[in-house]
Amino acid sequence: MVQKKVLLCTGRLECWSGSEVVIFEMAQEFSKQNFQVDIFTYYARKEIKEYFSTYGFSITHHREIDLLNYDVIYTQQNSLSALLNETQIINMCQKGFPCIIYAHLSPFIDIEAPLARLEKKSVLLLLLIVLKQKIVC
């Protein structure tokens, strides 16, 4: 059986607060579901990066990530946009999109989740319920 892969995207892993806690807890839950967990961020403070690595979570800031390698992509703080380019979009249109989940953690919904106005408002709540029930995309 091929192991499923999830990419968790966030703007920063700088201090132990909202965004960092969400990414860490999601990484733990996906790991329990036997997903390979990779994390993309623009910036990760050394201490936080080391802490995540003790749990086996890979953190990268490199933008050469093939999104088609992932079954699920979770993005907050509009961080997925750094990985999207014309080639990625064409490949996904031709080969199929992974399950992409846009989330926002602040009142700046239009900046953090540009597609949020097209999605149902309960997407994040649904994600949390699904993870809690140990059912994944």
Image (cartoon, grey):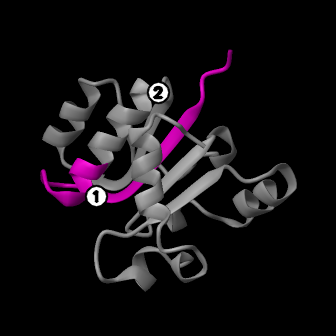
Residues drawn in magenta = 1-22
Identity of the residue drawn at 50% across and 44% down: 7
Give coordinates of residue 134: x percent, y percent: 46, 34
What is the quadrant of the C terminus in the image?
top right
Residue highlighted by disc 1: 12
Left or right of 86 in this view: 67? left
How many residues crowd mark 1 within 10 Å: few (<14), some (14–19), many (20+)?
some
Give coordinates of residue 85: x percent, y percent: 66, 65
Q: Amino acid at mark 1?
A: Arg
Check residue 9 for magenta coloring: yes
What is the quadrant of the N terminus in the image?
top right
Residue highlighted by disc 2: 33
Q: Amino acid at mark 2?
A: Gln
Gap between marks 2 and 1 measured at Cα: 25 Å
Quarter residue 4 falls in:
top right
Quarter residue 132 falls in:
top left
* SS under mark 1: strand
Quarter residue 38 falls in:
top left
Which residue ends up furthest to the top in the rendered image? 1
Q: Earlier in the sequence, mark 2 or mark 1?
A: 1
Identity of the residue drawn at 34% across and 24% down: 56
The residue nearer to you, when weighing 110 against 12, is 110
- Residue 28, compared with residue 80, is above or below; it is above
- Residue 14, compared with residue 86, is above or below; it is above
**Residue 44 in view:** no
